[in-house]
């Protein structure tokens, strides 16, 4: 009995580059189960003859390509087109460099993963202040809003894991609800050229990037803890990552932070503690041709505001300004009493991408956020647990993006954005406020953009971009009839009025449309000896936010009356930034001058009088518009003094002018500079010991919004100085760390630091609570991180 098999089939194929369809010569083609070899010719073609029917396990390799494996059943003469990514190794090398550049011509600074971990028990704002040109607007020591070149809040874009963060950022005392332990590197872009993320980056952009994982079967993670003597608290953070050679990966992370009352140099800052619980999870798949990433995070913060800072009226403020110590000092406690803030933030996203042969990469992202903010005032016992203000903000968006990179030396990004946002204020029976500070509103946004980078030659790249955004806001708000008519709204906006008046309040439905146009133009050029020149121009426009338009009442956590205006126009900024950089480990520097002209700049300033409410007399702050300019320079230097000693220094100079009123802008950072010397010994457990000096000069340029108010106790008008800046100060910090090998796969990093080494008493001009208390005094800090 005989059995015969037909072995006359042929298998032919052609191998091309996935990127640009060019033929790949010299590719190795291996039929693994038959142990047959061949290679592609100059046209990318190959051929096997006299093959038997059956399963074919094919493996294709090429220099600088990812190996491709194909399995199919051979039943007849067969031809297959096979694509490899010939530029994979080249792209990977470029991506390593591009990790330091969000845009080819952007001027930016980066905090590495290791540098971020040094601030694991601090806030995002604390971490970013270590960069030149970045400062912060503080409310006490735990509420820290980042500032870039003197601008903050709605003028900064914060991108958290590729999602734009929305968490009632309009408030001066509303810090970003972000756990820096959940991300990877953090970038600061000092310009308005990042049009992919939005049109309103008048100040700049903060980009929190997730970690990238290699495709291999492994399990790793780390647990860190920090202990502090100031506040007698700290945090613990743990994360674990599982990756697979197939391309799948998963990550789980959680952290908990708790501090009691912090201490100034000479006294306790009563009710200044913080509690924070955070968690995040990530799951995805990554290959060159396709992949997806799903991410979710939850942040819950309870933040105390020092008891002495919550004044009952303007006369309490006068007494606080004239005192050297807070009016209320109690013993240390972990309890967080009113006044306080309680905020929770949910963020979720799913992102998927697919590469198309000869075209590029298409990405589609959907995300949502839910932010709940409660502000608690000191009230009568029956209302002690009821928030004085309660906001819920829901945001959802969808954003496709097409990256076209099939043409050598040219990359084009284009896409659009659809976003919906809803804000709900708590009902009146809860807050006991007849008119909430921020009304209920719905906001609709649509945008389209195109950006491109073209590499003129090996040393020079130019970039350009354009973006258009449409925004519509629809609100439901009650006004006092007197206010409505006094502002002439009854004649200017009769279409907003419902005609319904109840208890001297009129019901209105304001609706506004805004059209924003943004553009960018940039150039980067490299010279010999590691020198780079960068230039960037950005046109950015920003619509007024809900607070600027509609505020009309007592802002409890700010202890002031805020009044918005329906007459506000959009801001239009023209920002120019240049930079000369030398990137060298032995000696490097960057000098980055900038100029920002802002038409119709919206500012919140004291109105020069105190208004009386049932709570007492409060200073009224009003939004208005002026033309403004902000200009300055950031300087950074690094110098390797020897094999073991490194010097770093920075200097930031800034000036902000109110051009309309020929005066200074309010709340502008003063000149500051820092110097640090670090000793490193890699052979001795990677020992690092450093000392840092930080100096902030007195802000001598500030607008005079001081005023007189009647004091019923003294029965006379008294002078209220709310504008003058505190004195200059200099701080010293000590830092040290060492790394110990535990096993072949695990290590322990130990750090010991001292902040405010000499326990200096000082006050910061950009701290809204500077009237009431000093800044935090000396702190001893120990950090332990176990990597496994």
Image (cartoon, grey):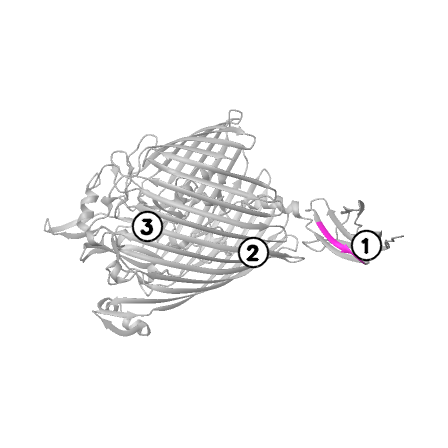
> Which of pointers 1 and 2 lies earlier in the amino acid sequence?
1
Name the residue at 60% across, 39% down: 528
Write down the residue under mark 2. 352
Residues drawn in magenta: 69-75
> Which of pointers 1 and 3 lies earlier in the amino acid sequence?
1
Q: Residues within 10 Å of mark 1 (few under 14, many from 20)?
A: some
Return the residue nearer the eye: 354 or 102.
Answer: 354
Compared to 636, does 71 lie above or below? below
Q: Give the residue at the far front of this rendering.
A: 1
Name the residue at 41% across, 38% down: 236
Question: Does dot 1 land on a helix, a strand or a loop?
Answer: loop
Contact between labelled residues 3 and 1, with CB atoms less than 8 Å apart:
no
Principal SS element in the magenta part? strand
Q: In the image, 449: left or right of 47?
A: left
Return the residue nearer the eye: 478 or 529.
Answer: 478
Write down the residue under mark 1. 53
């Amino acid at each position: 009995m005989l059995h015969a098999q037909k072995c006359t089939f042929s298998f032919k194929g052609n191998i091309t580059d996935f990127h640009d369809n060019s033929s790949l010569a010299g590719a190795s083609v291996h039929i693994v189960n038959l142990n047959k070899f061949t290679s592609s010719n100059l046209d990318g073609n190959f051929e096997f003859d006299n093959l038997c029917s059956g399963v074919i396990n094919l493996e294709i390799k090429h220099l600088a390509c990812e190996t491709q494996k194909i399995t199919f059943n051979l039943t007849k003469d067969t031809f297959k087109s096979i694509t490899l990514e010939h530029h994979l190794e080249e792209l990977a090398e470029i991506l390593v460099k591009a990790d330091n550049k969000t845009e080819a011509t952007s001027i930016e600074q980066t905090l590495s993963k290791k540098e971020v971990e040094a601030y694991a028990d601090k806030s995002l704002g604390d971490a970013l202040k270590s960069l030149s040109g970045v400062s912060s607007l503080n409310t006490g020591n735990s509420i820290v809003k980042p500032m870039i070149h003197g601008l903050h809040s709605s003028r900064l874009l914060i991108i958290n894991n590729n999602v734009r963060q929305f968490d009632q950022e309009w408030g001066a005392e509303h810090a970003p609800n972000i756990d820096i332990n959940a991300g990877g590197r953090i970038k600061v872009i000092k310009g308005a050229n990042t049009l992919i993320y939005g049109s309103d980056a008048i100040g700049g952009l903060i980009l929190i990037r997730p970690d990238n994982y290699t495709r291999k079967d492994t399990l790793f993670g780390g647990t860190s803890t920090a202990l502090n003597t100031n506040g007698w608290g700290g945090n613990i953070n743990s994360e674990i990552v599982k990756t697979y050679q197939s391309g799948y990966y998963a990550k789980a992370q959680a952290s908990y932070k708790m501090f009691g009352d912090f201490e100034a140099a000479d006294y306790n800052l009563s009710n200044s503690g913080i509690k924070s619980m955070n968690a995040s999870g990530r799951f995805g798949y990554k290959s060159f041709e396709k992949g997806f990433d799903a991410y979710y995070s939850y942040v819950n913060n309870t933040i105390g505001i020092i008891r002495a800072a919550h004044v009952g009226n303007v006369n309490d403020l006068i007494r606080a300004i004239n005192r050297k110590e807070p009016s209320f000092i109690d013993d240390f406690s972990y309890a967080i009493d009113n006044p306080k803030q309680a905020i929770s933030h949910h963020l979720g996203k799913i992102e998927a991408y697919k590469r198309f042969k000869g075209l590029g990469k298409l990405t589609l992202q959907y995300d949502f956020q839910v932010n709940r903010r409660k502000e608690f005032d000191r009230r009568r016992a029956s209302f002690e647990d009821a928030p004085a203000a309660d906001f819920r903000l829901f945001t959802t968006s969808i954003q496709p993006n097409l990256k076209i990179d099939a043409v050598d030396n040219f990359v084009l990004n284009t896409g659009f954005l659809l976003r919906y946002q809803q804000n709900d204020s708590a009902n009146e029976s809860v807050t006991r406020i007849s008119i909430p500070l921020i009304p209920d509103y719905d906001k609709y946004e649509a945008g389209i953009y195109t950006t491109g980078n073209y590499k003129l030659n090996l040393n020079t790249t130019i970039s350009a971009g354009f973006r258009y955004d449409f925004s519509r806001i629809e609100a439901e708000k009650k006004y006092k009839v007197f206010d409505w008519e006094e502002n002439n709204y009854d004649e200017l906006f009769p279409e907003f009025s419902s005609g319904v008046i109840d208890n001297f309040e009129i019901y209105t439905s304001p609706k506004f449309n805004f059209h924003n146009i943004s553009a960018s133009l940039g150039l980067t050029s490299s010279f010999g000896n590691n020198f780079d020149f960068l230039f960037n121009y950005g046109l950015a426009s920003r619509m007024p936010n809900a607070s600027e338009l509609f505020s009309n009442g007592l802002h409890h956590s700010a202890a002031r009356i805020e009044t918005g205006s329906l007459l506000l126009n959009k801001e239009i900024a023209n920002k120019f930034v240049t930079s000369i950089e030398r990137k060298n480990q032995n000696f490097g520097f960057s000098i980055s001058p900038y100029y920002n002209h802002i038409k119709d700049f919206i500012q919140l300033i004291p109105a020069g009088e105190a208004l009386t409410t049932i709570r007492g007399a409060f200073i009224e702050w009003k939004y208005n518009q002026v033309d403004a300019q902000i200009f300055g320079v950031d300087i950074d230097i690094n110098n390797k003094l020897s094999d073991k000693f490194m010097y770093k220094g920075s200097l930031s100079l800034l000036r902000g002018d109110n051009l309309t009123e020929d005066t200074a802008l309010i709340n502008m950072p003063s000149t500051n500079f820092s110097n640090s010397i670090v000793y490193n010994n890699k052979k001795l457990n990677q020992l690092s010991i450093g000392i840092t000096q930080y100096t902030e000069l007195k802000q001598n340029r500030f607008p005079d919004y001081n005023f007189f108010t009647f004091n019923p106790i003294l029965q006379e008008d008294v002078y209220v100085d709310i504008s003058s800046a505190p004195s200059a100060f200099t701080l010293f910090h000590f830092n040290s760390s060492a790394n110990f090998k535990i096993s072949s796969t695990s290590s322990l990093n130990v750090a010991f630091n001292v902040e405010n080494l000499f326990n200096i008493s000082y006050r910061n001009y950009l701290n809204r609570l500077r009237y009431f208390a000093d800044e935090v005094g000396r702190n001893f800090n120990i950090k332990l991180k176990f990597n496994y």
